[in-house]
Image (cartoon, grey):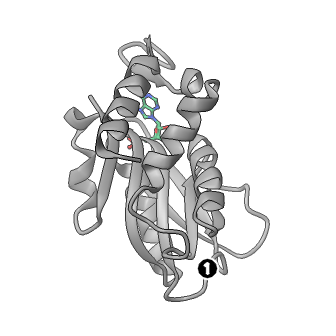
Amino acid sequence: MTIAAAAHARDEIERTIRNVPDFPKPGIQFKDITPVLANARLFAAAVDLLVAGHPPGSVDAVAGIDARGFIFAAAGALRLNAGFVPIRKQGKLPYHTLEESYDLEYGSNTVAIHADAVQPGARVLLLDDLLATGGTAAAAVKLLRRIGAEVVEVGFLVELSFLRGRDRLAGVNVRSQVIY
Ligand code: AMP
């Protein structure tokens, strides 16, 4: 994709993302990406943007975060001729797992990965739909590193920059396509 085409695609994606106020709780502005997914051209463009700069063969796996991250990571893995690795909510993966917990505004969350998801030294691109406070992505990076992966980049379709999620991802390459 040329630089101009990429900029145009980002604009179109931004205009297509639907803002849903007060979902799932009062005060949250939910960024609904389903209209982007439903548009074949924009879905393909979103995947192309997320994997841009990573030639096929340059990463061993694309990891996605439960659940919307799976959509982009699985499609990106096919584009890059790489494997797909799910990072799931606690209690979903059937084999030996490693877990990481992180704090939320109220309570905490736990994500998990299969202990043998990648070989030590594997180069992994991590994708999710949206970077908010960064807790989820930071926990996912920790899991990947604990199983010996090299996290080459963490990519997001959307970043809510006012929540400063990048601060929790210090020391990782972070790239977002649409920034609010
Ligand atoms: P965080 O750990 O705070 O960075 O939250 C990131 C995760 O929560 C992502 O997997 C998003 O899918 C989801 N998320 C958080 N805030 C929003 C929002 N405003 N709109 C849509 N998804 C969100």
Ligand 1 is in which quadrant of the figure?
A: top left
Q: Residues within 10 Å of mark 1 (few under 14, many from 20)?
A: many
Quadrant of the rendered image containing residue 85: bottom right
**Where in the figure is residue 130, as x and y percent of width and height?**
42, 39
Name the residue at 51% across, 20% down. 24
Which residue is tagged 1?
118
Rendered view: 66 above or below 147: above
Rendered view: 144 above or below 168: below
Residue type, mark 1 in image: Val
> Element under label 1?
loop
Q: Is residue 39 left or right of residue 160?
A: right
Name the residue at 50% across, 39% down. 45
Quadrant of the rendered image containing residue 27: top left
Rendered view: 175 above or below 57: above
Name the residue at 41% across, 13% down. 26
**Where in the figure is residue 179, as x and y percent of width and height?**
28, 34
Question: Which residue in the rendered view is the most extreme toward the right?
Answer: 94
